[in-house]
Image (tube, rainbow, N blue to C red):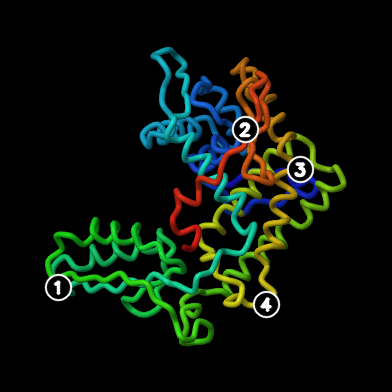
């Protein structure tokens, strides 16, 4: 499902392959709601997703899927249904928004250590399934394959990967694995750990992000983006940016090509995201209020702040809160040490 953007929208990039309705709804709820007390009517969700060209049937299917995943829950038994974010979803959204907005803010604290994983799974029998599961688990924890069955990630925290390997390989007959902390004699170059990463491809992805949204930044600076355009544009920028904290290994500077475009991409994202926050929030309130009279009391937006990620006060006078950097402990692969 593509995000629909009018060709006449100045500075708003045309979406090519947009997020699914479920993914888009998750992004919107994570960006603009921060309380499990808010009652969210289904028709308000339909209207909000309609801003992105999502049909009513697809919007309701997205609601159903997020309910099954436990991110939202039905409040009461009335019709039409009313939903609310679960406390677990609120905690996850805060952690993830902090992770997205704070990524790249400063170089990692580098100790010179790497966690390395070696594993062996029998070729016969059911070996293929656990081998695939190990690779998937390692990838989700930020590991890259250095050699056939040797995987690495920067840092020294081996606890999460040790637990993951126990979960996957305990009970798989004939499997063996080892987790160690190592220092490389030659970190850079073709025989060092940096060779495990496609840094050229990652740099190209950052450059493509910059090229895609540079015109939008100009339009934002010139005041040419109204509230309706702001909601779609801000969501597009965040949806494009949020992949980088998950695919960028955040290597120390001495292992990165020069110049490295992460900082330029982050600065562009933050400028657009911050400048359009209030406009996007206002558009959401406008669209949702006919079906949700209390919308202005609950809809808010995340923004970057000096000490963390803040949630500006919503219409009911709730105080601004500054969220601590929970992502550092919640995502052990996001920091070294």
Q: Disc 4 vs disc 2: which is toward the camera?
A: 2
Q: Is residue 303 left or right of residue 195?
A: right
- Of residues 109 and 289, the one nearer the viewer is 109
Q: Disc 3 vs disc 1: which is toward the camera?
A: 3
Q: Is residue 125 above or below residue 33?
A: below
- Of residues 322 and 97, the one nearer the viewer is 322
Q: Residue at x 66, y 50 (%)?
A: 237
Residue at mark 1 to residue at mark 4: CA–CA distance: 46 Å
Q: Position of residue 60 (x, y in %)?
A: 47, 30
The residue that disc 4 covers is 258
The secondary element bearing badge 4 is classed as loop
10 Å crowding of disc 2: few (<14), some (14-19), many (20+) = few
Q: Is residue 99 left or right of residue 5?
A: left
Pick whichever of labels 1 and 2 is earlier in the sequence: 1
The residue that disc 3 covers is 275
Residue at mark 4 to residue at mark 2: CA–CA distance: 38 Å
Would you say the residues marked 3 and 4 are in contact, meaning their CB atoms lie under 8 Å apart? no
- Of residues 78 and 169, the one nearer the viewer is 169
Pick whichever of labels 3 and 4 is earlier in the sequence: 4
Pick whichever of labels 3 and 1 is earlier in the sequence: 1
Q: Disc 1 vs disc 4: which is toward the camera?
A: 4
Residue at mark 1 to residue at mark 2: CA–CA distance: 55 Å
Q: Quadrant of residue 143?
A: bottom left
Pick whichever of labels 2 and 3 is earlier in the sequence: 3
The tag on residue 321 is 2
């Amino acid at each position: 499902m593509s995000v629909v953007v009018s060709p006449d929208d100045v500075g708003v990039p045309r979406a090519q392959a947009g997020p699914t309705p479920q993914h888009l709804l998750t992004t919107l709820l994570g960006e603009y709601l921060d309380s499990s007390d808010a009652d969210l009517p289904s028709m308000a969700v339909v209207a909000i997703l309609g801003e992105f060209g999502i049909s009513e049937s697809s919007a309701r299917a997205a609601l159903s899927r997020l309910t099954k995943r436990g991110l939202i829950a039905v409040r009461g038994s009335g019709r039409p249904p009313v939903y609310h974010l679960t406390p677990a979803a609120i905690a996850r959204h805060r952690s993830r928004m902090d992770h997205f907005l704070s990524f790249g803010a400063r170089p990692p604290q580098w100790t010179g250590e790497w966690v390395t994983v070696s594993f062996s799974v029998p070729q016969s029998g059911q070996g293929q399934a656990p081998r695939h599961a190990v690779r998937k688990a390692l990838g989700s924890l930020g590991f890259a394959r250095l050699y056939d069955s040797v995987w690495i990630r920067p840092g020294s925290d081996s606890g999460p990967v040790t637990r993951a390997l126990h979960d996957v390989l305990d009970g798989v007959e004939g499997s063996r694995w080892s987790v160690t902390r190592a220092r490389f004699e030659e970190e850079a170059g073709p025989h060092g750990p940096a060779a495990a990463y496609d840094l050229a491809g990652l740099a190209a992805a950052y450059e493509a992000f910059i090229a895609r949204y540079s015109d939008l930044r100009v339009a934002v600076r010139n005041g040419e983006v109204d509230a309706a355009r702001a909601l779609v544009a801000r969501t597009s920028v965040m949806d494009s940016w949020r992949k980088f904290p998950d695919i960028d290994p955040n290597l120390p500077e001495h292992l990165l090509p020069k110049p490295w475009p992460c900082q330029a991409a982050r600065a562009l994202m933050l400028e657009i995201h911050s400048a359009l926050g209030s406009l996007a929030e206002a558009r959401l309130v406008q669209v949702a209020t006919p079906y949700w009279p209390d919308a202005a009391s609950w809809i808010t937006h995340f923004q970057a702040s000096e000490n963390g990620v803040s949630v500006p006060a919503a219409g009911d006078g709730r105080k601004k809160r500054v969220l601590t950097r929970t992502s550092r402990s919640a995502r052990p692969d996001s920091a070294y040490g």
